Structures are given as C-alpha cells and as structure tokens.
Amino acid sequence: MIDLHNISKQFEGRRRVVALEGVDLTVARGELVSIVGPSGSGKSTLLNLVGGLARPTAGEICIDGQRLDSLGDDGLTRVRRDKIGFIFQFFNLLPSLSCFENVALPLHLRGWKRKAIDERTRELIGLVGLTARLDHLPDELSGGERQRVAIARALAVYPPILLADEPTGNLDTRTGADILALIRDLHDRLGATVLIVTHDLAVSRSCPRTVTLCDGRIAGDERRQAEP
C-alpha cells in the first residue's frame, strides 16, 4: 500500500537542513504502524511526504501502486482527496461550522448529492459516538469530542490510508487513551492502513509495528504483539 524507496528531503534556507536521508519503508495494506523518534528526527516530514503534502528531494514514493513523486499538483490533490485521510494534533476544525457541517464539508467539496452527504455524515458521526452533538460548534465540544469530529471528517470517503500526526498530543491521558482506542477500533472495522506519528509510548506500544526515526534515517523497525 505504501512504498518509499531511497527517500530524501532537504530544506534550503540560510542553512541546508536534511530532514530525511535514504529512507526505505514498505507498509502493507491494512497495517497499523506507529512512527516514533526524537523531535527533529523527520517523523512529520515522512508523514507529509506519504500524504502528498510535500515532495521528496530524491527517491520514489508509491501509494497503492501509484507514483507520487512524479505527479503534478492536480494529481497529488486527487490522491489526497480519494485515498488519504488526515488527523492532526490541533483538530483544524472550522469554528463557525457545526459538528455536522465540519464532517460534511469534504463531501460537499467532492460534489456529492445532499441526500448522500446527509446519510454519510450521520453515519460517520454515529461511528465516532457523537450523534448527540450534531449541531454543536467546536467551542461547545471537549478536546476529545473535537478530535472525534476530526476523525469523522478524515474518514469522509472511507479512505484506504489514514495518517495521524500526534492525534493524542493535545489531550489529557484519559481522553488520549479513548481516542487511541477509537482509532484502533476504526482500523479493525474499516481495514484502513494507519500510520501514527507519536511521542507517546502508550500509543506506539498499542501498534503491532513501530518504526523509529533518528537523524532522518530509520533506526529501528519492530514488529510485536500490540498491547491492548
């Protein structure tokens, strides 16, 4: 499902910064993988490259058999729209839109018919346990509830790949555990390929596979029985 070959990413400025160098990584369809490492190790850069939010300086990226590094901007937009859902640490919800409207927005942008949008949005909000919060604005929701809305929005078209960047990083321990349990449950039910960038050991240990980055290179790739 995800195949990175000899990926490098450099940022040019007053000084050249090497974020990733010579990274090879293959993630099979349906895997649940955590990506860990110290700050500045290249975790978020790797996630952005897989999600088509950035382009590599060198190397090849294939998503579901399609080369991303050779696509133009329109092609990358289509891949992000159809194949990838994003979950961010700070939710990125539109404050003036209700829970229902935030989740429905990606479907409107895809030109779905109103009835289909209504059905899918209610289904998604029910999936994350927020049916009673349909009309609430983000400011009227707890942090955990806002993250649930963000997850529902990320699943709008049931994408085959779900990318989560510190999804529990802005939450208290108990709420973070609830969100992690939700992501694992959705992974089991929907069969999506999930990559989670995290500093949280509890999050990484809950995943059957953990990839460790250090100084822009893969320093470890561990497969184990995930902790419940």
Image (spheres, rainbow, N blue to C red):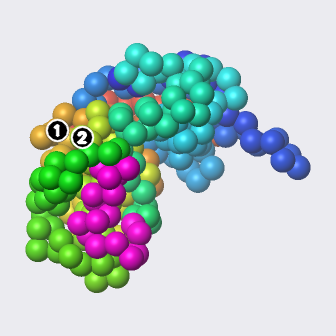
Look at the image and say whether residue 95 sits in the magenta stretch. yes
Would you call the spot at circle 1 few (<14 residues within 10 Å), some (14-19), or many (20 or more)? some
Q: How many marks?
A: 2
Instruction: Indicate left or right for 45 with 12 as reference.
Output: left
Residue found at the far right of this picture: 14
Closest to the camera, between mark 2 and mark 1, is: 2
Read off the residue under disc 2.
Answer: 158
Residue range corresponding to the magenta coloring: 93-109
Q: Is residue 165 above or below residue 31?
A: below
Q: Quadrant of the N terminus?
A: top left
**Which residue is the extreme one toward the bottom?**
140
Q: Nearer the viewer, residue 32 or 11?
A: 11
Q: Residue at x 40, y 75 (%)?
A: 95
Q: Is residue 167 left or right of residue 176?
A: right
Question: Residue 154, how many percent across, how many down?
Answer: 32, 50
- Residue 124 shown left or right of residue 79 in the figure: left
Q: Secondary structure at mark 2?
A: loop
Q: Which residue is mark 1?
A: 190
**Residue at the image position 53 percent from the left and 47 percent from the top:** 44
Sequence-wise first label, 2 or 1:
2
User: Marks 1 and 2: in contact by CB < 8 Å?
Assistant: yes
Identified at 29% across, 38% down, the residue is: 159
